[in-house]
Amino acid sequence: MNVIDVEPGTGHPEIVVVDDVSKHFIMRRDNSLKERVVTFGRQGRIHREKFDSLKNVSFSIPAGTSIGLMGPNGSGKSTLLKIIGGIIDPSSGSVRRRGRMAALLELGAGFHPDLSGRDNVYLNASILGLSKAETDAQFDSIVAFAEIGDFIDTQVKFYSSGMYVRLAFAVAVHTDPDLLLVDEVLAVGDEAFQRKCMDKIRQFQNEGRTIILVSHSASQVMEVCDRGVVLHDGTVAYVGTAADATRVHRDILEGRRKANVAETVVEEEQVKASVVRSIEVLNSARQPLKDVKPGEDMIIRIVVSHTDAHSRWYTTFSIDTPSGQQVFGTGVKRLGSYHSEIGSGEATVEYLIPNSTFGGGQYFVNADVLDANNRRLDVLWQGAQFFVPMDERRTGTLHADARLISQVR
């Protein structure tokens, strides 16, 4: 049994115990009624395939902790969260829970489109375990949080997606849960609403409630969670700190990406005047660098192969997060220069990033080569990657020191 540690001496009881849980689904290939009639009986077994979504998963969660549940697509995260939430049953094993639970798995799943927002508040709240008297006491707060205003008595089928999401979230977080299950819903809504959701999550944490968050975002897990569970192919790959969980998750994703690249068959190779052959991340001694410490010098080495001679040419590179957000980019032209005349063959270009200040997380490096007229000849996406160790004292893509210098009473 994997136990998610909390600070020693706190004596927090276990609020969730996942004990040897497995879950399998039967997938059918004969989807139409005609196919099922034709394959009825023994032949029907040929058209059914068993898929193991979870395999002997075990861990326990002490009350008052915030857990990030991570893993690549298809690893079983959402299935496990639904089993913990009691929405589906495991094929084997068991889950034990304590206290009242609220699940933000599919926002608005308990809403009826033909009912008004007011009626749906009472309907959804009852599904989540609130009595009418409890909902009466919370109603004004729910409406204020959702910012629905005059639309509360309008049928929800006329709501915008933002209004629908806000009302559903507002109902769920006002059920006074001891355990809150969240499945990627913090990624919906506008920025102001997402911040409002995060503020409510932090309020729950300060009140000692337990939170299980499914997310693909390492920065979100670091911001919200103190511990992490990583699933891979339906099994537990890691249980421990959020920082280490994001590292394990990154290693799994990178391994999968490399495997997909290795299996890709190039059917037709296009002849290009110039090709970006490789990108490397090196330290100041020009040794391969996979883990970059804040303040460490970085060298980005780009190897370009030319089939033709060039009197003038350019390279650029950019550094992105796994979500595709660019955090840095430059090139020889932006730096006020150009690459001089070169004949056919390979050329190596190096850029220095002194005293790097990237925040904790995974980063990918892209590079392209351009001709004298600034036309792109080739680009290599995610040609290299590096990782900056996570620091629980800060979040974001910028590493900067901060300290408290005053406090006003």
Image (tube, rainbow, N blue to C red):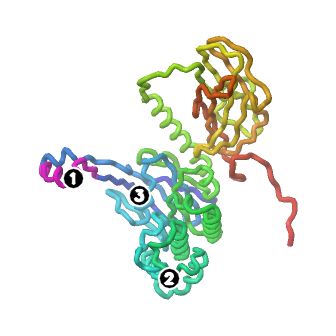
Q: Residue 63: x and y, percent?
A: 55, 66
Q: Is residue 166 left or right of residue 339?
A: left
Q: Nearer the viewer, mark 3 or mark 1?
A: 1
Please, is residue 298 above or below residue 29 in the view? above
Residue pictured at 22% horizontal, 49% vertical: 30
Q: Please state which amino acid type lies under the numbered disc 2.
A: Asp
Mark 1–mark 2 Cα distance, whole angstroms, equals: 42 Å
**Of residues 281 and 36, which is closer to you in this image?**
36
Q: Which mark is residue 153?
A: 2
Residue pictured at 61% horizontal, 16% vertical: 306
Residue pictured at 72% horizontal, 14% vertical: 341
Mark 3–mark 1 Cα distance, whole angstroms, equals: 37 Å
- Asked whether the beta carbons under mark 2 and mark 3 sit within 8 Å of each other, the answer is no
Mark 2–mark 3 Cα distance, whole angstroms, equals: 45 Å
Q: Is residue 30 left or right of residue 245?
A: left
Q: Residue 273: x and y, percent?
A: 58, 19
